[in-house]
Image (cartoon, rainbow, N blue to C red):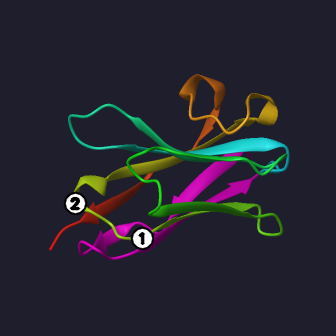
Amino acid sequence: QVQLVESGGGLVQPGGSLRLSCAASGFTLDYRTIGWFRQAPGKEREGVSSINARDGSTYYADSVKGRFTITRDRAKNTVYLQMNQLKPEDTAVYYCAAGPSAFGATVDPKLLHTWGQGTQVTVSS
């Protein structure tokens, strides 16, 4: 069964850190692009970061640049999103998605066809 499973969300205070995981099963993330998205209540889905496993290129939205880092563990078939200096506006459900690597480190949801179920991140004091 082809699936992505996110984990690592939770409640954290402003300025804190979390590491999200996106574990793939049923297929390999090699030669894939893996993106992280988030959606807060009443807001549109936002592409946060992505990594192209074939060439290692990465993308970060301006809103997270310098605070979030995307990495991949090939042996574990898992992609991580390290989130530091978290802000209340980072509160959202975070999703990972995977698709062909031909389009580079993209966060175009139309190009990523396998999605996880999401994990809640809440930044609040």
Residue type at tag 2: Pro
Q: Can residue 117 be seen at all in this image of the molecule?
A: no
Question: Residue extending furthest left?
Answer: 125
Question: Residue extending furthest top?
Answer: 110
Disc 1 element: loop
In the picture, the disc for residue 4 is none
- Magenta residues (range): 1-25
Disc 2 element: helix
Residue 51 point in image, percent of width and height:
68, 48
Residue 65 point in image, percent of width and height:
47, 54
Q: Would residue 85 appear left or right of 55 to someone viewing this image?
A: left
Residue 108 point in image, percent of width and height:
57, 28
Residue 87 within the segment the image draws in magenta? no
- Which residue lies at the image location 84% right of the left edge and 50% below the top edge? 30
Q: CA distance from mark 2 to mark 1?
A: 12 Å
- Which residue lies at the image location 65% right of the left edge and 26% below the top edge? 111
Q: Would residue 115 appear left or right of 79 to someone viewing this image?
A: left
Q: Which residue is mark 1?
A: 84
Q: Which residue is mark 2?
A: 88
- Which residue lies at the image location 25% right of the left edge and 65% below the top edge? 123
Residue type at tag 1: Asn
Most common secondary structure along the magenta stretch:
strand
Tell me the quadrant of the picture where the C terminus can be found. bottom left
Relative depth, front residue between 118 and 42: 42
Write down the quadrant of residue 23 in the picture.
bottom right
